[in-house]
Image (cartoon, rainbow, N blue to C red):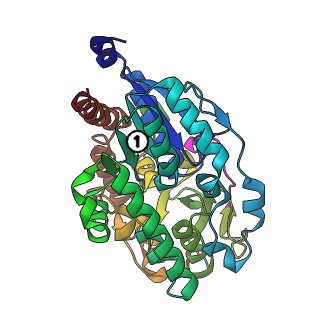
């Protein structure tokens, strides 16, 4: 391949520790969106990930992870200190051998590790490809998330220390690391000052629904439905679901709380005021039925794709400041802030009785996220990758 051909259609080898299809969770959605946009902008993308592979992306599909076993463990309290079985593939020799073989055969111009758990195999693939530049995409800072969300006991401290070591080694091996916000860049710099200069902010984005799919929140629909969306095997989302079911639902009688997402906690059950929607393939219908969307996120890092989706569907949002961190949302302008159960209940009632406020919040948030489309984020990633590849020529 000539240098001109290389610049015209460069090769990108992407490795993911989790399946990117179907879209279950923020990491999968972000990875799929980035790779799809890079492919559309001229990159020849080859993906190594657990089966099944997303439509439109090529690559060797690995074995399906032990998702059923993981889901069956969700009622056990000690589960929060165990790694997801998907993560365990990062330490198995067979996926590493496959990554090395693909690196030698595909000869990528750049290698992208989707998440810190993919970086070990990605590093081996980059070396096999002759020293291709290695990029790391962090949908959140793993060590900071574990430290905040898994308590202060011995097991939590041990888990945080192990993950911090893995994350430090991953960052040391990369050419550049993408983080989703300035806040995450600051966290990464505090934890790993030696790698702070490698961090580049590449925000999360959203696909804007067609205008015909979006209508304004209705005044006093029956019932007034507040929607919560999140993969509840993820600790911050699990805590949010438990908070809504156990603390908010008992004191708010103005409507119902609908929860969409896989693996609801054992303590969260359907009731008169709580509706469990499972993990639907599409959320458009549920956003259309929702009067408002809530995000009671108290821990964790990264930015919340579901907040961006709610804004794109023009739904008023009630959230903790942590849930909208890094998105540029202003309280009272783009969302209603709340920290406690009574505050969330009061905000729901305020929206139920004030459709003018609900429409104003929804309109302002929609205008803001129109600048955060995945097409724009993809163009930013494309420019960064191409600039580094040219340096390695």
The structure residue drawn at horizontal position 31% and vertical position 36%, both measured from the top left corner, is 381
Q: Of residues 72 and 341, which is closer to you in this image?
A: 72
The quadrant holding residue 12 is top left
Residue 354, magenta (yes or no): no
Q: Position of residue 40 (x, y in %)?
A: 41, 22
The structure residue drawn at horizontal position 27% and vertical position 70%, both measured from the top left corner, is 190
- Judge left or right: residue 35 versus residue 72: left
Say if 293 sits above or below 137 in the image.
below
The structure residue drawn at horizontal position 32% and vertical position 11%, both measured from the top left corner, is 2
- Callout count: 1
Q: Of residues 296 and 26, which is closer to you in this image?
A: 26
The structure residue drawn at horizontal position 47% and vertical position 35%, both measured from the top left corner, is 128
Q: Position of residue 166 (x, y in %)?
A: 46, 63
Circle 1 residue: 206
Q: What's the magenta bit mostly, secondary-structure-wise?
A: loop
Quarter that holds the C terminus: top left
Q: Of residues 31 and 123, which is closer to you in this image?
A: 123
Query: Which stretch did the figure color magenta?
Result: 276-285
């Amino acid at each position: 391949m000539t240098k001109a051909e290389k610049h015209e259609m460069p090769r990108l080898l992407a490795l993911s520790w989790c399946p990117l299809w179907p879209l279950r969770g923020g990491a999968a959605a972000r990875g799929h969106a980035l790779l799809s946009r890079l492919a559309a902008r001229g990159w020849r993308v080859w993906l190594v990930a657990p089966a099944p592979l997303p439509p439109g992306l090529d690559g060797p599909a690995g074995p399906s992870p032990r998702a059923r076993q993981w889901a069956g463990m969700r009622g056990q309290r000690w589960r929060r200190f165990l790694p997801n079985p998907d993560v365990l593939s990062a330490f198995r020799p067979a996926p590493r051998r496959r990554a090395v073989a693909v690196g030698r055969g595909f000869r990528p111009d750049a290698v992208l590790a989707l998440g810190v758990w993919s970086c070990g195999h990605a590093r081996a693939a980059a070396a096999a490809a002759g020293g291709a530049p290695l990029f790391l995409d962090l949908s959140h800072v793993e060590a900071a998330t574990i430290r905040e969300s898994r308590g202060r006991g011995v097991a939590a401290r041990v888990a945080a220390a192990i993950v911090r070591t893995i994350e430090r080694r991953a960052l040391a091996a990369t050419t550049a690391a993408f983080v989703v916000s300035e806040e995450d860049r600051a966290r990464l710099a505090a934890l790993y000052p030696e790698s702070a200069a490698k961090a580049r902010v590449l925000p999360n984005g959203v696909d804007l629904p067609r205008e015909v799919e979006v209508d304004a929140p209705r005044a006093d629909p029956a019932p007034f439905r507040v929607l919560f969306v999140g993969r509840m095997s993820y600790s911050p989302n699990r805590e949010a679901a438990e908070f809504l079911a156990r603390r908010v639902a008992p004191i708010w009688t103005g409507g119902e709380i609908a929860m969409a997402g896989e693996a609801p906690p054992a303590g969260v059950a359907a009731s008169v005021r709580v509706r469990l929607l499972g993990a639907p393939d599409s959320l458009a219908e549920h956003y259309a039925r929702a009067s408002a969307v809530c995000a009671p996120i108290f821990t964790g890092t990264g930015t919340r794709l579901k907040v961006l989706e709610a804004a794109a569907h023009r739904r008023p949002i009630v959230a903790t400041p942590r849930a909208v961190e890094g998105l540029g949302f202003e309280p009272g302008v783009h969302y209603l802030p709340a920290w406690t159960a009574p505050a969330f209940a009061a905000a729901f009632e305020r929206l139920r009785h004030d459709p003018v406020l609900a429409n104003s919040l929804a309109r302002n948030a929609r205008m803001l996220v129109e600048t955060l489309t995945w097409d724009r984020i993809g163009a930013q990633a494309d420019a960064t990758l191409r600039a580094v590849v040219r340096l390695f020529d």
